[in-house]
Image: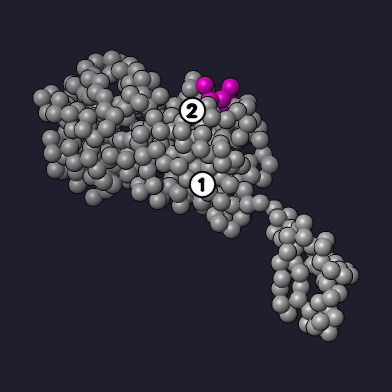
């Protein structure tokens, strides 16, 4: 049986149209020509496709790059899948990557708003969430930020976010003091430490302040260094080369995550003991890391987005905070640097890389 398509405006003009079931239109002239309904062509209205529910679109806005986010995207899709959503089957994803260039985020967020997405997932740094909120006061927004979301002006409160924004905070700004303490325990003979921040990150100054407070409390001298691009990272280590012995704390920040190979290589070249914000640094050869499980945070983002697609409102979804943190030690790197971890520090490590 042949299938013929006509528009919804033209189907009324089919000569001798005798009956229709739903949007299937049978032309009596066609039946006369072919002798029976079974042989006659079916005239099928395009309105059938037009009336199908449109696939919801999730806008994914990140300060990071696609190339180093594969594992995180898998975790995000897992979260969506736990509530029944599969990319390209019943949900579409529109990706926008700033690749560490935060100044691009407002334009990328505006692009997603014009795309009329159902929800915006803003991740890869606090700057993504701020850009998304500035771009729309109506589209639901789910964030994953390093800063205090209340202090950053994203939500009214953690328990009652209000407005169109909610999400996850990894409490990075509150962990810098803990990281400095772990670094001190690893190299207690060091009296000078440096902290590396990215001034383009809205949470950077808060993180630096937290680290300075911790340094004062322990009687250490702290040098604050800044970098926003690869060449500035190179310059930072030229400064550090003149300050040894010195320990380094690299702020948990998306741009630095994208440059972790560069950072770890410089620290190894100068034999500088350093602590980082996520496990991936230790896996790349960094001495140690302390922070949240980042893939788990992305899985939770997927669950948040799926809940909103099912009808939940951001204002009714409290901001989530992590309850578990990972302390990872790379023993191989420690041996190269000549660092001997005390037994007590090894005992509390969640993972020791041999």
Quadrant assignment, res 220: top left
Q: Which residues are magenta?
A: 153-159
- Does the magenta-highlighted stretch encompass residue 246? no
Q: Can you name the residue that lies furthest to the bottom here?
A: 35
Q: Name the spot of residue 112 as percent of width and height, x first.
A: 53, 39
Q: Earlier in the sequence, mark 1 or mark 2?
A: 1
Relative vertical location of residue 221 with respect to residue 336 in this rendering, above or below: above
Relative vertical location of residue 354 with respect to residue 131 in this rendering, above or below: below
Q: Name the spot of residue 109 as percent of width and height, x first.
A: 50, 35
At a point 77% along the width and 60% down the height, the residue shown is 10
Asked which secondary structure carries label 2, the reply is: helix
- The residue where tag 2 is placed is 130
Quadrant assignment, res 159: top right
Magenta span: predominant SS is loop
Tell me if mark 2 has few (under 14), some (14-19) or many (20+) residues whose alpha carbon lies within 10 angstroms of its own.
Answer: many
Between 37 and 129, the one nearer to me in the picture: 37
Quadrant assignment, res 15: bottom right
Q: CA distance from mark 1 to mark 2?
A: 19 Å
Residue 94 badge: 1
At a point 58% along the width and 22% down the height, the residue shown is 156
Q: Nearer the viewer, mark 1 or mark 2?
A: 1
Q: Name the spot of residue 68 as percent of width and height, x first.
A: 35, 47
Does residue 179 appear anywhere in the picture?
no
């Amino acid at each position: 049986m042949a299938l013929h398509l006509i528009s919804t405006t033209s189907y009324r003009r089919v000569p001798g149209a005798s009956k229709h079931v739903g949007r299937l239109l049978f032309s009596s002239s066609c039946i006369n020509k072919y002798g029976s309904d079974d042989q006659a062509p079916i005239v099928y209205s395009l309105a059938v496709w037009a009336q199908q529910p449109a696939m919801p679109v999730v806008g994914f806005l990140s300060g990071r790059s696609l190339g180093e986010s594969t594992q995180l995207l898998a975790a995000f899709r897992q979260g969506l899948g736990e509530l029944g959503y599969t990319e390209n089957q019943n949900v579409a994803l529109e990706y926008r990557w700033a690749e560490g260039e935060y100044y691009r985020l407002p334009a990328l967020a505006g692009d997603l708003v014009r795309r009329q997405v159902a929800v915006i997932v803003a991740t890869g740094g606090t700057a993504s969430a701020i850009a998304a909120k500035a771009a729309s006061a109506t589209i639901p927004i789910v964030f994953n930020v390093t800063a205090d979301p209340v202090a950053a002006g994203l939500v009214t409160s953690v328990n009652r976010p209000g407005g169109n924004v909610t999400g996850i905070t990894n409490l990075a700004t509150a962990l810098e003091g803990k990281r400095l303490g772990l670094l001190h325990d690893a190299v207690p003979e060091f009296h000078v430490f440096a902290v590396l921040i990215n001034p383009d990150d809205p949470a950077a100054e808060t993180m630096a302040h937290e680290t300075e407070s911790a340094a004062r409390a322990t009687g250490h001298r702290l040098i604050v260094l800044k970098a926003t691009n690869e060449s500035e990272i190179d310059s930072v280590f030229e400064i550090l080369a003149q300050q040894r012995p010195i320990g380094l704390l690299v702020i948990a920040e998306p741009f630095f995550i994208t440059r972790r190979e560069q950072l770890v290589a410089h620290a190894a070249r100068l034999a500088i003991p350093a602590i980082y914000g996520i496990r991936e640094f230790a896996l790349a050869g960094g001495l140690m890391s302390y922070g949240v499980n980042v893939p788990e945070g992305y899985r939770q983002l997927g669950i948040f987005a799926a809940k909103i697609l099912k009808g939940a409102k951001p204002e009714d979804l409290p901001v989530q905070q992590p309850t578990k943190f990972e302390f990872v030690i790379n023993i191989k790197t420690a041996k190269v640097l000549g660092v001997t971890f005390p037994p007590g520090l090894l005992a509390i490590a969640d993972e020791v890389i041999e």
